[in-house]
Image (tube, rainbow, N blue to C red):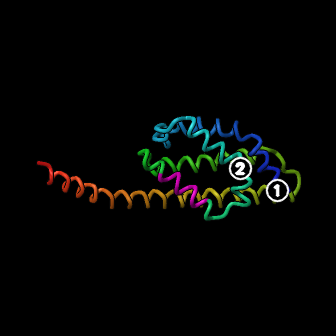
Amino acid sequence: MVALRLIRLIETHSEQIARTLATRIRTSPKTAQLQKISESELLTGLQELLLHMSEWLLSKTDNDIEQRYQQIAARRASQGIALADSCWAIVMTKEYLWDFIQKQGFLRNPIELYGEMELLALVDQFFDRALCYMAEGYSQNQVSTEIAAPRKKQREFNAAAFVP
C-alpha cells in the first residue's frame, strides 16, 4: 500500500522533518509568539507527532485527537500564545507534510496516485480536526479563566476585609 509506505517514510525522516518544521515555525512572523516556548519543547512535540504518524492517521480515534489538541491548547494559552499562532503552526505542519509526500516521486501508475491521494486525505482530515480541537481548547481555557477571575477577586476582597 502506497499510503502506508509514505507514512513510514515520514516516520523514518521524522527527526529531519521536525527540525525543518521547528525552524520554520520559530522564524515565521505568523507564529512569532511560539518563540515563547523552548526549542526543545517544540521539537519534541513535532517529533512525537511525526514518529507516530501512522498511529495518528490510522488507529487513533477522534477522541484521542480531541484530547491531545485540547491539552496542547490549554498549555499554549497558559503560556500566553495566541490561538492564531498555534493554528498557523498546525497549518504549516500540514503544508510541509503535503510537500514532503508529493516530492517523494512514488507516482508511477494510477494505483500509486490513488494511494497518495488517500494519504493526503488522511493528513487533511487529521490536521483539520486538530485545528478545530485546538480552537475548542482555547475557548474552554478562556471560559475557565473568565469564570476564575471574578472568583479570585472576590477571595482577595474577602481576605482584605479580614485584615486588621
Vertical order, 64 against 96 (above or below): below
User: Dot 2, how many residues are within 10 Å of its Cα: few (below 14), some (14-19), or many (20+)?
Assistant: some
The location of residue 7, given as percent across then percent down, is 77, 50
Q: Could you tell me residue 114's position as x and y percent?
A: 81, 60
* Residue 65 drawn above or below residue 76: below
78 over 125 or under it: above or below: above
Residue 100 lies left or right of residue 140; in this view the side is: right
Residue annotated with mark 1 = 113
Q: Is residue 75 one of those drawn in magenta?
A: no
Asked whether 61 or 91 is in front, the reply is 61
Contact, mark 1 vs mark 2 (Cβ under 8 Å): no
Question: Which of the 4 quarters of the picture holds residue 12?
Answer: top right
Residue type, mark 2 in image: His
Q: Quadrant of residue 9?
A: top right
What residue span does the magenta drawing correspond to? Answer: 65-74
Q: In the image, what residue occupies the spot 52% across and 35% down?
A: 38
SS of the residue under disc 1 = helix
Q: Is residue 73 magenta?
A: yes
Query: Of helix, strand and loop, which mostly describes the magenta segment?
Result: helix
Query: What type is the residue that disc 1 sits on?
Result: Leu
Quarter of the rendering containing residue 68? bottom right
* Residue drawn at (41%, 45%) of the image: 80
- Tell me the tag on residue 52: 2
- Horizontal side, residue 132 vs residue 103: left or right: left
Seen from this angle, which residue lies furthest bottom? Answer: 62
Asked if 91 appears above or below 135 in the picture, the reply is above
The alpha-carbon separation of the residues under discs 1 and 2 comes to 23 Å
Label 1 packing within 10 angstroms: few (<14), some (14-19), many (20+):
some
Q: Considering only order in the chain, which callout, 2 or 1, is on the residue closer to the N terminus?
A: 2
